Amino acid sequence: MKCDIITIFPEIFDAYLAESILKRAIQKKLIEIKVHNLRDFTRDRHKTVDDYPYGGGPGMVMKPEPFFNAIESTKTNGVERFTIMLSPQGKVFNQDMALSLSKERRRLLFICGRYEAIDERVRENLVDEEISIGDYILTGGELPALVIIDSIVRLIPGALGDERSKEEESFTWGILDYPHYTRPPEYRGLTVPDVLLSGNHKEIAKWRRKEALRHTMRRRPDLLKKASLTDEDYKLIEEIKEERDEFD
Ligand code: 4FN
């Protein structure tokens, strides 16, 4: 997977890309990420990337020329690209989108905005897809780009040391996780559920699935509608409902 990022703050990416799974994936050449400084593609003495909005109003708008220049100069012969603009107007990012981007054969180009907005001509002429990471105000598209890259990279075969964790995730995918515990078995009088210490793997699997379903019913009932549930899951849901009558 090859990615380009266009930003006025390239340093933002350094620390995050230098850690953990991302770092390893880059070292293993599973991904390549090139961060480009938008200012390098300005043609004026002051390296201007913003200007006042036509029609007036508060804030500054990012000029179109540096983006057009950047996108043209970072083109490589024969390699197709898919251009993504991080934007509050975009489709809200989810795991399905992460999966489909992780399978993308084209080079991904991320455009990160700052100030109030980017000149509309960039979106109209250079962008294939607009993606948002959620409904809140941000100061820039850099964190959204990192969020998306982070979620994509862990889906690339070989990027996680332990491929089993992905398999387990696909089983739980769609619902929340079960509660996790590690040693010690008792800490300040706080204990670990007996079943997890029992060594009975069948009972442990059932308990985890049930607790995962219970959490999802309580906190994110919206996820249950989309999740692919088994007959066993529906039985567990009935059990949970009988234990508490908060779901009627
Ligand atoms: N944000 C909203 C409405 C109007 C403006 C914003 C906003 C960064 C360049 C865009 C925000 C959120 C999720 C990119 C937000 C995202 C951005 C994102 C983003 C500077 C202009 C701006 C109704 C969503 C609260 C600033 C809502 N995912 N404007 O944040 O880039 O990717």
Image: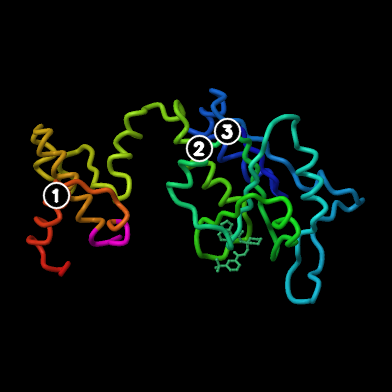
Identify the residue at the far right of this view: 45
Instruction: State the residue in front, 220 or 142.
Output: 220
Q: Position of residue 36 (x, y in %)?
A: 72, 41
- Lateral position of residue 51 relative to residue 209, left or right: right
Instruction: State the residue in front, 232 or 179.
Output: 232
Residue, disc 3: 105
Q: Residues within 10 Å of mark 1 (few under 14, many from 20)?
A: few
- Helix, strand or loop at label 2? It is helix
Badge number at residue 102: 2
- Lateral position of residue 35 relative to residue 238, left or right: right
Residue, disc 1: 189
Q: Is residue 176 magenta?
A: no
Q: Quadrant of residue 105?
A: top right
Disc nearer the start of the sequence (1/3): 3
Some atom of ligand 1 lies within 8 Å of the CB belonging to the residue at label 1: no
Q: Position of residue 218 (x, y in %)?
A: 24, 62
Up the image or down, 110 lies above or below 25; here it is below
| Nearest to viewer (mark 3 / mark 2) | 3
Q: Which amino acid lies under the numbered mark 1 shown in the image of this protein? A: Gly
Q: Quadrant of ligand 1?
A: bottom right
**Magenta span:** 217-223
Tell me which residue sits at (32%, 29%) in the image: 164
Disc nearer the start of the sequence (1/2): 2
Distance from disc 1 to disc 2, alpha carbons, whole Å, reads 45 Å
| Nearest to viewer (mark 1 / mark 2) | 2
| Mark 1 and mark 2 residues within 8 Å of each other at the beta carbon | no
Tell me which residue sits at (19%, 55%) in the image: 214
Instruction: State the residue in front, 62 or 123.
Output: 123
